[in-house]
Each structure stands twice: as structure tokens, then as C-alpha cells.
């Protein structure tokens, strides 16, 4: 069983993002970039499926500029067998990525495609769902447990009221939630091994995909600054302030 895993290069989750002074987007110059945390969970899950004997080959895919090769090497150090870079310097919106992944699904015919539930940069939470629709595949989003059983995969999902377990026929699309697993640390020997693994590069045109943005960002702005807190002497003052100043009760 082949597993395709989508890995996005995003601003590292520890970085405090700053908005560009012209409001056109986020400052990316000399900012630390890493693999989207939900995608690390996706790669880890694919590797666990391989270790259990359920998967035979793991292919990591990243779409973006040449630096996404680093993200693919990290995926290969975690345990992916090979990587595919879809190289472009165009801004890629979720629909464009879903179309690129659909073209690769047609080419590679994986039994399972695992994506993160969302990329922590644009928080779109759209790509997996769009891919499932375009490829006409069943989908299980926000997975917290994945079990392959023959030609089916049982996925437990985190929903409002608790946990829901659904059974999908393979091939299928899964998106990962935080509690699915805890990704392993990448070891130096595995980083060295990953350097020798196969990495193919395509352009969107090679896959017949038009990645032109369909949405226009009008403005990006910082959230309003929070004022400093104050100490109140007693409960009566607190209630008075909540009623008459904050007007929340
Ligand atoms: P989003 O819909 O942008 O929140 O992203 C959801 C998931 O789609 C991510 O966690 C990735 O698994 C995948 N994805 C989005 N953009 C890319 C990209 N440029 N390259 C590879 N995978 C991507």
C-alpha cells in the first residue's frame, strides 16, 4: 500500500509573526521555517503504518519554492521513502495545492493520502477536503486514530460531542489532528540517510495544473494590542467594573 503525505513549509510555530508595514502580508525575510506541525504528525502516522506492515511505500510531497526540499528531506529523515517537489514561486492557495495533489494521486495511485488538518500559516483547513472532492475519494478529517483493516481504514475523529469512528474504503484521504500521535525526533543518522533518498521535481505545468491565485488578499493587520491588567481591591469593585466599564455582565 502506497501512502502519499503532503508536507508544507511554514513559518516555525515558535516564531512571533510580524505583519509587513504595508499590510500586504507577513514578514518572511530571515524568519525560521519548518514543516507544518500537523504534517509532521501525518508523516509519523505513515511511518507507523509502514512499521506495522500496513504501508509499503511513503511518498512525501511539498509544493512551493526550491527551499521546500529541506521540508522533504525532514520528511524522509522521519521515514518517508522518497520525495516529490512541485516547484513554483507563485503564491499557492489551497485549491491550487489540491489540484497539484490530485494530479499526483492520478500518477502515483496511492491507497491513502494523509495531510495535516490545517497549515498553521494561513489556517485555511481546506486542502484535504478539496483534494477528496477533486479526486472523488472518501475523506476523514481531524483524525485522532487510524487503523487499516484490509481494503478499509477505520478513522476516529474528534467531533464536538466526543469521538466518532468511521470506516472508509481505500483509497481515501485523511487529515490529521493534534492527538493522532507524537512525532519522533529526527536522528542524525536518519538525516544523513535522507540525503541519499530519491527526490523528483515537477513544475505545475508538467502536471497540467494552473496554479494562478483565485482569491486576492486585501489587507493583513495585527490584532489590536491588549491593554495592561489591573488589580481590584475586592469582589464588589470587580463586579462593578465588569458591569459598568467592561459591560460584560
Ligand atoms: P490548509 O488547507 O492550507 O490549511 O492545509 C492543509 C494541509 O494541506 C496541510 O497540513 C498540508 O498537509 C497540505 N498542504 C497545504 N499546502 C501545501 C503545500 N504548499 N505543499 C504541501 N502540502 C500542502
Image (cartoon, helix red, strand yellow):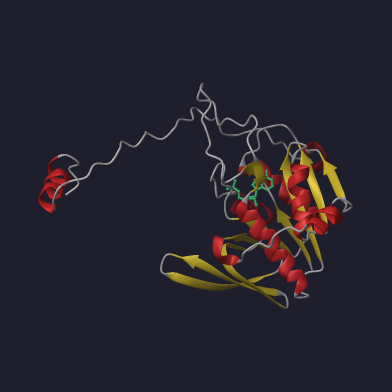
Residues 223 and 126: in front is 223
Residues 235 and 174: in front is 235
Quick one: quadrant of the N terminus?
bottom right
Residue 103 in view: no
Rendering coords of residue 89 (x, y %):
72, 32
Rendering coords of residue 195 (x, y %):
86, 50
Q: Quadrant of residue 177?
A: bottom right
* Residue drawn 63% across the image and 33% down it: 213
Residue 176 in view: yes
Name above or below for residue 135 compared with residue 63.
below
Q: Residue furthest top?
A: 22
Q: Quadrant of residue 191?
A: bottom right
* Residue drawn 31% across the image and 36% down it: 227
Left or right of residue 79, residue 39 in this image: left
Rendering coords of residue 21 (x, y %):
51, 22
Q: Quadrant of residue 182?
A: bottom right
* Residue drawn 76% across the image and 44% down it: 70
Left or right of residue 216, residue 229 in this image: left
Residues 60 and 130: in front is 60
Rendering coords of residue 240 (x, y %):
11, 46
Residues 29 and 134: in front is 29
Left or right of residue 40, residue 157 in this image: left
Amino acid at each position: 500500500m502506497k501512502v502519499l503525505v503532503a508536507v508544507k513549509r511554514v513559518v516555525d510555530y515558535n516564531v512571533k509573526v510580524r505583519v509587513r508595514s504595508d499590510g500586504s502580508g507577513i514578514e518572511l525575510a530571515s524568519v525560521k521555517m519548518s514543516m507544518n506541525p500537523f504534517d509532521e504528525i501525518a508523516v509519523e502516522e505513515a511511518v507507523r503504518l509502514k512499521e506495522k506492515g500496513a504501508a509499503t511505500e511513503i511518498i512525501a510531497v511539498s509544493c512551493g519554492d526550491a527551499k521546500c526540499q529541506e521540508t522533504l528531506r525532514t520528511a524522509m529523515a522521519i521515514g518517508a521513502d522518497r520525495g516529490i517537489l512541485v516547484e513554483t514561486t507563485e503564491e499557492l492557495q489551497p485549491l491550487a495545492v489540491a489540484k497539484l495533489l490530485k494530479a499526483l494521486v492520478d500518477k502515483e495511485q496511492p491507497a491513502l493520502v494523509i495531510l495535516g488538518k490545517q497549515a498553521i500559516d494561513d489556517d485555511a483547513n481546506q486542502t484535504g477536503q478539496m483534494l477528496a472532492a477533486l479526486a472523488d475519494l472518501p475523506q476523514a478529517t481531524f483524525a485522532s486514530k487510524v487503523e487499516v483493516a484490509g481494503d478499509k481504514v477505520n478513522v476516529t475523529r474528534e467531533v464536538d460531542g466526543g469521538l466518532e469512528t468511521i470506516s472508509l474504503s481505500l483509497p481515501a484521504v485523511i487529515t490529521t489532528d493534534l492527538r493522532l500521535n507524537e512525532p519522533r525526533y529526527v536522528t542524525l543518522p536518519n538525516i544523513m540517510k535522507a540525503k541519499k533518498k530519491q527526490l523528483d521535481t515537477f513544475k505545475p505545468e508538467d502536471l497540467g495544473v494552473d496554479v494562478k491565485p483565485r482569491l486576492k488578499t486585501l489587507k493583513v493587520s495585527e490584532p489590536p494590542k491588549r491593554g495592561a491588567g489591573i488589580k481590584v481591591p475586592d469582589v464588589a469593585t470587580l463586579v462593578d467594573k465588569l458591569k459598568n466599564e467592561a459591560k460584560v455582565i
